[in-house]
Amino acid sequence: MTKRTLETLRNIGVIAHIDAGKTTVTERMLYLSGASHKVGQVDKGTTITDDDPEEADRGITIYSACVTFDWNKSHVNLLDTPGHVDFTAEVERCLRVLDGAVVVFSAREGVEAQSETVWRQANKYGVPRIAFINKLDREGAGFERVFNELNRRLGATPVAISIPYGQGPEHVENPFRGIIDLIEMKLLTFDKESLGKQFEVSEIPEEMLDEAQVWRETMIEKLYEYSNEMMELALQEEPIPIPLIRKVLREATLAMQIQPLLCGSALHGIGVQTVLNAVEHYLPSPLDRPAVKGFNPFQKDKKTGEPAIEERGPNNEDPFCALVFKIIPERTADNYWVRVYSGELKQNSRVSNPGKELKENVSQLWQLRASKKNPQGQIEKVGAGDIVCLIGPRHSITGDTLCDPKHPIVLEAIEFPKTVISMAIEPENTAERKKLGEMLEMLKRQDPTFQAVENEETGQTLISGMGELHLDIIKNRLLRDFKLNVKVHKPRVSYRETVSKATETVGECHRIVGGAQLFAKVKLRIEPNTESDKPVTLINACPPESLSADLVTAVMEQLKAKGEGGGLSSFPLSKLKVTFLGGETREEGSNEMAFSIAASEAFEHALRAAGPVLLEPVMKLQITTPEDYYGDFVNDIQKRRGMISETEQRGEVTVIEAHVPLVELFGYSDSMRSLSQGRGGASMQPHEYQPAPPEVGREYGITS
Ligand code: GDP
């Protein structure tokens, strides 16, 4: 085996819409690489990557872990990413640390809602991709249809490098039997007995030759755009050497101009070798990725006065830096999964977490090997580009940077979406409260999209997350795994509050405090703000000569606190702009306290006067159903206050896209199944916040 070097490393993830076959593809990859001798089956809950009991129960992948295996001359670190939309943050975290991705699509369902989300996320993080159209053995499979959807729905530039030989079981005279490699122009047929481990290479059958030629021409023509050398050869009508085709495919993939497209059926072991070869040929090594940027919190840039920006290149000579992307709690010590960007780290060393001004010990380094005999391998040191599990750190959390204490750097943080749903939990007694607090702290460290806030008055703790399933899993962990005695309330959506019109108000303070008469007047404008992502934008427009700097600061601090403190409904404020217009003083008694009180009063007046509105989270719902149930789904969506935005016939199925308030979607997966007698599928993701019906507002004290 070749030495594990930067050139031979591939940090990849398999990402997909739920049920497209991500877990099956992953399993087959491990099996083919010789790492696991028994093929796990998702439906039986025996896969290698789904090792959390919660995952095996639900047959979906929730928590990502990293498995390492060898393929030809490459060393592949495979990060397992979740497919369910409630876990988009996990996908984001993985995309942040991997170098390339294999995106799996179902040949039947095609591009689904979640495929669009992950595709956009991968664009955002600049991750080069290859695409794999799976399930070609299934009824209703359509290779060309999905190829076109990739173009049209994702704005992708797929370049097919293999095509199916036959399609679906219904073509009795032409069932799906194998794939045609358009680069080598050969037919590959796979032996079912060995689950595709054995395969045969033969000439393309006569009846497929024309079709294969057309696809090959399409591939070559697309590649001309990226290579003058290829173009010249074509003009001279010279044959194009295979290594040149591969080189151009690689360059264009790394530049994110194209995505090589492959196909097969993971369940039957058809075509997965070609995906692994494509990972080696076309996906980047850490060396192909740009240097990472971060800042040094202890050094100011001379020109800007901001913390100095620093870079770390993918090499062992630069100082060590790594990003924590996952923490798995263990009874003995938490497992910290990190991606190393630069430098080397040895066992028994000390690293720093400059973002939190902490030092951590690293006592051991582990890599999870997908091998039955030696599933975990302890290693002495890890180098740039690799992914490894650290034992020793205790205080760092997901998203933190660990680095060489002599060369502090904080890498760009991972952005996490806001929570849309929450649930109250109440411990039975004080001892339980303490335990609950500790457990929630631990869960928060692992999962940055999960929040928990204790309300001292009611004794309740409000936990918030990304969806019903997310909270359900947390609930199960508390009750089943940690055996806590807590009462769990029904989940409710996280509303927000904003205003409907611009209003100017004045707040005054005429109080007597400690025998002294206080006086202040503060003038504010509050208005809706749809331009900024910030919940509350504060602007100081007070003429500088009218008030002293201390009084202005007192007002701005009070406005900031009020903005963060929640609205009239006590839900968080959102889409709001608050401008401090000016104030009035008197010779005596106009101090900071007076101005704080006046600012607070002005803020509250303004919220009432500006027409408060309660906003509710609206989800983008995508339903895939046989046409027979289309009418029932449409009626049901209307009953749930939903709006249909798109309906499309894709092969055998109808796809409905709608925007539906989250509060109307509780328990939707069950009702969706009974509506379609188990034949439909649905997924949803947060779309936007929209005004809730007035009666909901009134329930929370908002009348406008
Ligand atoms: P994931 O949710 O994306 O991880 O998808 P899974 O790998 O769990 O697969 C979802 C379902 O599709 C399972 O029942 C698999 O057995 C099945 N499946 C996966 N790949 C194929 C395939 O190539 N052909 C067929 N017919 N079924 C498949």
Image: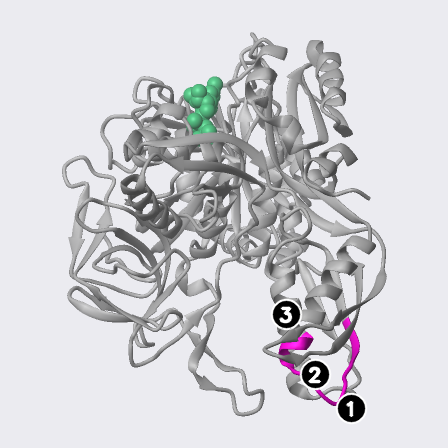
Magenta span: 580-595
Contact between labelled residues 1 and 3, with CB atoms less than 8 Å apart:
no
Name the amino acid type tagged 3.
Gln
Return the disc, 3 or 2, that comes first in the chain's sequence: 3
Residue 447 position, x and y percent, is: 41, 48
Q: Is residue 493 above or below residue 499?
A: above
Give the alpha-carbon distance from disc 3 to disc 2, as whole Å: 16 Å
Badge 1 residue CB within 8 Å of ligand 1: no
**Nearer-the-camera pick, 322 or 377:** 322
Give the alpha-carbon distance from disc 3 to disc 1, as whole Å: 21 Å
Return the disc, 3 or 1, that comes first in the chain's sequence: 1
Name the amino acid type tagged 2.
Ser
One can see residue 73 in this view = yes
| Mark 3, residue position | 558
| Mark 1, residue position | 545
Say which residue appears at 30% left-offset and 51% top-offset: 73
Give the alpha-carbon distance from disc 1 to disc 2, as whole Å: 16 Å
